[in-house]
């Protein structure tokens, strides 16, 4: 599904060069639930950005579904993001001016789905995260947990095969975080591949596989046979 | 505290230099353009002789042509009526006046003869219109009656003929007649030329003044607008003088309401009497117009400046709407800062003052720049008006400067009211929640 | 398209929308009406006078002193001028077309009927007028030298012939202007003039005169010591002849002064000075206003994009292409502008009605408003294209940054 070999990512500013990832190789199979951990600044988000085609890498090779993404145009990358990948962000990133329905609608709009099907899917997605009756509300009228559930609905509505989450529970209390985690596990069981960055060791422990990054390199890659999902 | 807020305003300007400069520019353009039109209107629509404009009256008689539909009574007097009015008004200052043209042969052989535009007027003309003298004086009524060949020169003509020296007592030759100089005017160029709006209200003043009786005495050639509604009996000058041809301006000075009433009665009686003779059959709304009424009645203010006023007002509106939008953006963009200030104890009142000063700061900058815009605009208009039109009336005076800056500050603050109100009412809690 | 969500998002920020829309509406009102005034004046200025304006000039001679005999001097001057190489012809005239000063009178078909008089400008000229003014005789014959009457102002008029402009003939005979030929027409004093010819076009001297196309030529020279010569030259000779004619007139041994040696083009410029001033001012106003409005749109767009950077990054992360971000902001601007120009169309017509009522201007043509609407929609799109492109350039990676 995802295959990175020898990826380097260097950020250049006027004065400093930061090696965010060096000689980074990782292989994720279809249907896996991988958590990524590591200290702040080690390159977790950078990895996620590369995996999600939000950013380009400096050198190395990245195959997504066997396809080399380095030669893709910006528009092609956008289409891949839209069709194969779903994102969940730590700070939700909902559009404050749009109601929940329109927020979840955003990825579908970029896909050109017919109005009728869009409506069905959005309602389904919102129902799946338990917010069916709040379609016309604005994000600011929701709690943080609810907002993150909307973001998850938005990530799911396009039925991606690959879900990337950057500390989805980082802004939530443990109870709410637990709810979100259960939701993600459920999604994973339905066949969606998930890569999730987290700082929470207990969440990491629940996953099938935990990758620990240090200083832009993989420090350990543990497969957890006791994981719940297994 | 005030200076602190001004410093905050300056800092805030520097934080969003492009947005802030856009606002300054918008205010400058809007206010500058408005001031250009304001200046034109201020002069053209203003009171040219404020301290006595309500004492000087022009007569409008009930002239008309029974056969011609929509005949507008000419705003001047026929010779015979002017003569009667001169006689009947002798208790008051009054003046019959009209233009003439002549060839002036300068004394000595240095200058070639040249053409002058002159004005014939009754003796009271100078006192009535506060005409300033550099040397000598005007003439008296005896000179009118005696058709004495005396002349008052404009400052410019005196400069040309006598190098600006006191020329009282010198003689000049106009159309072959010898005139004695008895006075020289100081600079006098009222705009609009309110005492004669019939021959171009924005026109240069005349160069030589002589007793009006000399024009009727045919010493010099009459000129200026002439409007006949019945053909003279024959081509002689006498027939012309007796004809229904209006070409004389007639002014009277009525210092109080008592004299006004008396004069009104006299004029009304005269019209009634003339009506019995078959003249003056077309009633007019009003027979005595004071200076300002006369200028409105004769539509001295050009259509152009009135159209431009409306357009300039809309231009200002656009610029202010622009400013409202940009200020709103600017203030809401500072929500974070405002939230922090509130958390640190800033009350609504102080936030209000801070942002009012910030808006005023932008307005003041816009006003100063707007002065530049106005100056450029007026200079451009002067150039475009060409060499023949008098343009020295187009100047930026203290009133315009003060009005520009005040208008700029006031309008920016008014434009800023809503943005300021929004800035003072930002809820820091909401702001923090979404972050 | 995503009209629905864009509109709903806009409605959450009503004031911002109203501000820009109002601004566009005012801008459109001013611009459309200004363009219309400019066109109206330009049409006035473009009306031909009937003369060969590019190759014509005029000069006035005013004699003085007892020895000045105008009748002799006129013949002498005209002979001299007409013989100069490059001169096509010259005439005396009491008034210069488009100059703004001249004399007018009314003429009608029946003597004594003052109510049916048609106003017309009177040009007192000699038999060379058709060549000198470059007028085309469309009916009848020119004046002959014998018809020219000389008189002092106080002598009775004796002219009996006239040549009309076609417009004047049409005013008298609306059905068939040719009928005017050889008819007598009567002035306010009952005197008769026989129409010997009709020329296709000759304007009165006053550009704002209601009957500006109504003119009459009469064969007379008024001996009042003041004479104006109108001279038509071969192309390219005008400027040097202006100098030469003035020099020769000045050196002739007569007591006189020479004034107003002007090309007809200069005379026209002076006459239409206010119109061209107005036109220039309006053009500046239009330019300024478009600039201010465009800058306003840019300013607000830049601001709202900066505020929404994270949102835009998120959209990009969710699969929006650069083009769809560009399209989003272009569409947003289109919606606001559409509201603005709709209101603008109403205000434009309203302001025009005010102009029509207050200043007696003609009504605006129907196509002005739609063209204005399109122009402002285009202006809005052009203004927002820069900010929208910078929005499209925002990296999707911004979505994962927390600030
Ligand atoms: N756009 C950028 N320009 C320059 N340096 C960057 C940029 N983005 C990230 N970095 C640097 O790359 C390194 C990795 O950053 P990254 O955001 O991936 O860390 P992280 O592991 O997600 O940390 P955290 O847990 O705090 O979110 C850091 O040193 C960071 O400073
Ligand atoms: Mg991170």
Image (cartoon, rainbow, N blue to C red):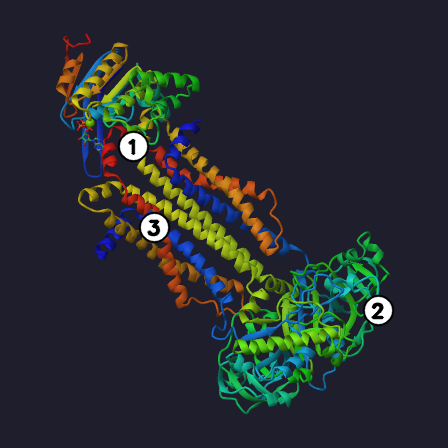
In the rendered structure, are the residues bearing label 3 and label 2 in contact, judged by CB atoms less than 8 Å apart?
no
Residue topped by disc 3:
B21
Label 3 close to label 1 by CB (< 8 Å): no
Residue A74: % across, % down: 35, 26
Can residue C96 be seen here? The reply is: yes
Mark 3 and mark 1, same subunit? no
Residue B306 drawn at (x, y percent): 53, 58
Q: Distance between the residues labelled 3 and 1?
A: 26 Å
Total numbered labels placed on residues in the image: 3
Circle 3 marks a residue in which chain? B
Q: Is residue A101 above or below residue C211?
A: above
Residue at 19% across, 33% down: A17
The residue sitting at 51% across, 49% down in the picture is C30
Question: Is residue C143 in view from this perspective?
Answer: no
Badge 1 is on which residue?
C310
Q: In this view, does B269 lie above or below C140?
A: below
Closer-to-camera residue (B109/C98):
C98
Residue holding disc 2: C160
Mark 2 in CB contact with mark 1 (< 8 angstroms): no
Dividing the picture into quadrants, the one containing residue B361 is bottom left
What whole-number distance in Å separates the C-alpha atoms at marks 3 and 2? Answer: 73 Å
Quadrant of picture, ligand 1: top left
**What's the chain of the residue with tag 2?**
C
As drawn, C74 above or below A79? below
Q: Is mark 1 on a helix, strand or loop?
A: helix
Q: Calculate the distance from the C-alpha at mark 2 to the C-alpha at mark 1.
A: 90 Å
Residue C391: image x %, image y %?
35, 35
Counting other residues with Cα less than 10 Å from the Cα at mark 1, is it few (<14), some (14-19), or many (20 or more)? many
Q: In which quarter of the image is residue B72?
A: bottom right
Identify the mark nearer the N-term, 2 or 1: 2
Q: What element carries label 2?
A: loop
């Amino acid at each position: 599904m995802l295959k990175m070999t020898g990826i380097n990512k260097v950020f250049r500013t006027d004065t400093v060069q930061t090696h965010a990832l060096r000689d980074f190789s990782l292989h994720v199979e279809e249907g896996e639930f991988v958590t990524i951990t590591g200290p702040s600044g080690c390159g977790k988000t950078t990895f996620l950005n590369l995996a999600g085609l939000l950013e380009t890498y400096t050198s190395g090779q990245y195959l997504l579904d066997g396809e080399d993404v380095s030669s893709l145009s910006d528009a092609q990358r956008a289409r891949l993001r839209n069709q194969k990948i779903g994102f969940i962000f730590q700070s939700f990133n909902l559009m404050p001016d749009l109601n929940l329905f329109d927020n979840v609608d955003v990825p579908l709009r970029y896909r050109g789905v017919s109005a009728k099907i869009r409506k069905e899917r959005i309602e389904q997605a919102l129902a799946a995260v338990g917010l069916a009756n709040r379609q016309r509300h604005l994000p600011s009228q929701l709690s943080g947990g609810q907002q993150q559930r909307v973001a998850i609905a938005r990530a799911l509505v396009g039925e991606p095969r690959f879900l990337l989450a950057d500390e989805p529970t980082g802004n939530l209390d443990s109870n709410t975080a637990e709810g979100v985690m259960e939701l993600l596990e459920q999604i994973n069981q339905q066949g969606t591949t998930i890569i999730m960055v987290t700082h929470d060791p207990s969440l990491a422990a629940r996953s099938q596989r935990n990758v620990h990054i240090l200083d832009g390199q993989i420090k350990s890659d543990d497969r957890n046979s006791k994981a719940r999902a297994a | 505290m005030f200076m602190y807020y001004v410093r905050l305003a300056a800092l805030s300007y520097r934080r969003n230099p492009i947005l802030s400069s856009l606002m300054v520019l918008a205010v400058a353009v809007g206010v500058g353009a408005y001031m250009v039109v304001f200046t034109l209107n201020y002069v053209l629509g203003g009171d040219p002789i404020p301290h006595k404009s309500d004492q000087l009256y022009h007569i409008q008689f009930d002239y008309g042509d029974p056969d011609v539909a929509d005949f507008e009574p000419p705003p001047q007097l026929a010779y015979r009526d002017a003569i009667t009015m001169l006689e009947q008004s002798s208790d008051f200052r009054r003046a019959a006046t009209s233009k003439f043209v002549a060839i002036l042969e300068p004394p000595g052989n240095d200058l070639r003869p040249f053409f002058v535009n002159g004005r014939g007027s009754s003796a009271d003309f100078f006192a009535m219109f506060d005409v300033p003298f550099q040397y000598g004086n005007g003439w008296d009524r005896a000179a009118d009656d005696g058709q004495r060949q005396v002349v008052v020169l404009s400052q410019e003509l005196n400069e040309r003929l006598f190098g600006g020296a006191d020329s009282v007592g010198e003689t000049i030759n106009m159309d072959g007649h010898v005139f004695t100089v008895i006075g020289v005017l100081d600079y006098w160029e009222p705009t609009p030329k309110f005492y004669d709006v019939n021959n171009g209200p924005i026109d240069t003043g005349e160069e030589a003044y002589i007793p009006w009786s000399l024009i009727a005495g045919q010493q010099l050639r009459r000129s200026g607008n002439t409007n006949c509604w019945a053909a003279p009996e024959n081509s002689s000058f006498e027939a012309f003088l007796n004809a229904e041809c209006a070409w004389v301006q007639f002014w009277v000075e009525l210092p109080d309401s008592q004299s006004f009433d008396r004069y009104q009665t006299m004029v009304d009686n005269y019209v009634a009497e003339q009506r019995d003779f078959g003249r003056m059959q077309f009633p007019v709304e009003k027979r005595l117009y004071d200076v300002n009424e006369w200028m409105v009645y004769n539509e001295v203010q050009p259509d152009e400046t009135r159209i431009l006023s409306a357009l300039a007002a809309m231009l200002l509106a656009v610029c202010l709407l622009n400013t409202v939008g940009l200020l709103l953006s600017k203030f809401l963009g500072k929500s974070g800062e405002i939230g922090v200030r509130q958390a640190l104890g800033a009350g609504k009142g102080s936030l209000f003052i801070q942002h009012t000063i910030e808006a005023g700061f932008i307005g003041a900058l816009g006003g100063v720049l707007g002065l530049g815009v106005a100056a450029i605009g007026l200079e451009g208009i002067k150039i475009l008006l060409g060499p023949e039109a008098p343009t020295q009336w187009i100047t930026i005076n203290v009133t315009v400067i003060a009005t520009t800056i005040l208008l700029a500050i006031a309008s920016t603050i008014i434009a800023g009211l809503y943005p300021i109100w929004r800035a003072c009412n930002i809820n820091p809690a909401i702001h923090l929640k979404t972050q | 398209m995503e009209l629905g969500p864009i509109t709903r998002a806009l409605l959450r920020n009503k004031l911002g929308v109203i501000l820009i829309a109002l601004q566009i509406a005012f801008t459109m009102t001013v611009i459309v009406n200004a363009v219309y005034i400019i066109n109206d004046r330009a049409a006035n200025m473009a009306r031909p006078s009937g003369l060969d304006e590019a190759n014509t000039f005029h000069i006035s001679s005013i004699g003085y002193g007892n020895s000045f005999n105008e009748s002799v001097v006129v013949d002498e001057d005209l002979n001299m001028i007409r013989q100069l190489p490059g001169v096509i012809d010259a005439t005396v005239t009491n008034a210069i077309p488009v100059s703004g000063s001249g004399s007018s009178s009314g003429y009608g078909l029946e003597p004594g009927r003052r109510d049916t008089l048609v106003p017309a400008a009177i040009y007192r000229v000699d038999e060379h007028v058709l060549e000198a003014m470059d007028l085309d005789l469309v009916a009848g014959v020119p004046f002959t030298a014998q018809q020219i009457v000389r008189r002092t102002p106080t002598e009775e008029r004796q002219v009996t012939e006239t040549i009309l402009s076609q417009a004047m003939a049409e005013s008298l005979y609306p059905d068939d202007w040719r009928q005017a030929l050889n008819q007598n027409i009567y002035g306010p004093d009952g005197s008769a003039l026989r129409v010997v010819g009709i020329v296709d076009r000759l304007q009165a001297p006053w550009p704002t005169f209601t009957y500006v196309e109504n003119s009459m030529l009469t064969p007379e020279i008024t001996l009042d010591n003041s004479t104006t010569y109108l001279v038509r030259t071969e192309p390219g000779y005008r400027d040097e002849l202006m100098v030469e004619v003035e020099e020769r007139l000045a050196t002739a041994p007569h007591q006189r002064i020479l004034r107003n040696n002007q090309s007809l083009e200069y005379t026209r410029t002076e006459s239409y000075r206010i119109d061209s001033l107005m036109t220039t001012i309006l053009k500046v106003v239009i330019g300024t206003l478009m600039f201010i409005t465009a800058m306003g749109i840019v300013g607000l767009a830049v601001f709202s994009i900066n505020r929404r950077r994270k949102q835009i990054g998120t959209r990009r992360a969710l699969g929006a292409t650069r083009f769809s971000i560009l399209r989003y902001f272009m569409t947003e601007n289109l919606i606001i502008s559409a509201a603005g120009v709709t209101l603008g169309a109403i205000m434009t017509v309203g302001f025009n009605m005010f102009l029509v009522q207050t200043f007696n201007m003609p009504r605006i043509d129907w196509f002005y408003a739609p063209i204005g609407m399109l122009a402002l929609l285009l202006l809005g799109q052009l203004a927002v294209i820069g900010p929208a492109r910078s929005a499209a350039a925002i990296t999707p990676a911004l979505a994962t940054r927390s600030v």
